[in-house]
Image (tube, grey):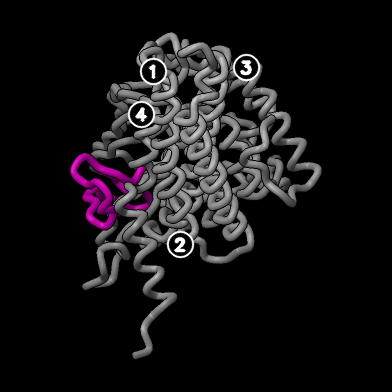
Amino acid sequence: MGRLAQTDGLTDTQREILATVRDFVDKEILPVATELEHRDEYPAQIVEGLKELGVFGLMIPEEYGGLGESLLTYALCVEELSRGWMSVSGIINTHFIVAYLLKQHGTQEQRDYYLPKMALGEIRGAFSMSEPGLGSDVSAITTKGVRDGDEYVLTGQKMWLTNGGTSSLVAVLCRTPEDAEPGAAPHRSMTTFLIEKEPGFGEVRPGLTIPGKIEKMGYKGVDTTELILDGVRVPADRVLGGVTGKGFYQMMDGVEVGRVNVAARGCGVAQRAFELGVSYAQQRQTFGKPIAQHQAIQFKLAEMATKVEAAHALMVNAARKKDSGKRNDLEAGMAKYLASEYCKEVVEDAFRIHGGYGFSKEYEIERLYREAPMLLIGEGTAEIQKMIVGRRLLEEYRSQG
């Protein structure tokens, strides 16, 4: 374990958990990640191993069978998993966000029913906000839920659903205009529905279709899908929290912790890129000496290491802020923005250090080069993060003149 990206002030339990996850990454993920990624193959054996480690229940409270750990512990585990293969962290993250939404906003019955099964990985979660023509404008969603007795009937189309095929529980954000007060702002007429389904593709419950995997340049292995709702009937007691009109706030709370997760992914991928770059630079020789002895390469390594360290520090700060119970949208936005941008830059520098071999599928850096761009757009684009950060700064530093 190198000197970079260390975290002070961890408990013995946290250090033990991280050491276990890192060992799992080194032995079970890194040796097979590139081969599985090239085949776009779901890492079923890795997922089973993570279930045995208890990772699916990492932040679920102990009374529901989880480990009851903090967001910081979770983020540091995501960093380790992403160092091995970022797609594995995606499989965990969407599950975690649904569990977090249930823990924070679910009714007691919903928590009692879902969380113990989620802690074991028996129920696997996914969540869905985006739509084909939506982008970052969540308030413009058109998927609709209409009350019909003791049920709601959902109709619409969702996009970019991570774990869409493998999940068995999806938290879906819909518009419920009939339940909103007249003249209410668009974001006050949204509701989160908990939809159970069979894993797989095609019609996975009456009216609900998962068409198939979306082909992507990177972030392979994990299934990213559409979700089509055509008259799906959901019991009213499967409204998250039991009250309509709260969906936007619930989802934004989930995305806030999700942005810490994406920052952690960026840190993990950047760490791995640095490891590959610094190792290759000491093995490859030009002009009679390892390229690591050339000043130009040393400058690159210095810049890469500094970016890895800075991104890790911001990510840890954002996680600790959320764990303290304070609002962390400013810190999460900063961490997500910086970590994703720095990740792209560190990966590209490692790619340059590899020279022509970086373009070969035989070298791991080629995979990282295709994975890094997803972080620039996942959980809100860099531009969205800068808007969030800018608005919060203006709130904090409002002129008194």
Residue 75 placement (x, y as % from top left): 58, 43
Q: Give the residue pinned by disc 2.
A: 330
Quarter location, residue 200: top left
Q: Give the residue pinned by disc 4.
A: 224
Q: In this view, does 176 lie above or below 66?
A: below
Residue 129 among magenta residues: yes
What residue is drawn where x is 40% and y is 12%? 357
Task: Kindly tell me whether residue 167 is visible in this rendering.
Answer: no
> Mark 4 or mark 2: which comes first in sequence?
4
Q: Give the residue pinned by disc 3.
A: 28
CA gap, disc 2 to disc 3? 36 Å
> Mark 2 or mark 3: which comes first in sequence?
3
* Secondary structure under the numbered disc 2 in the rendered image: helix
Amino acid type indicated by mark 3:
Glu
> Mark 1 or mark 4: which comes first in sequence?
4
Q: What stretch is highlighted in magenta?
A: 128-154
Q: Nearer the viewer, mark 4 or mark 2?
A: 2
Contact between marks 4 and 2 (CB within 8 A): the answer is no
* Secondary structure under the numbered disc 4 in the rendered image: strand
What residue is drawn where x is 36% and y is 25%? 370
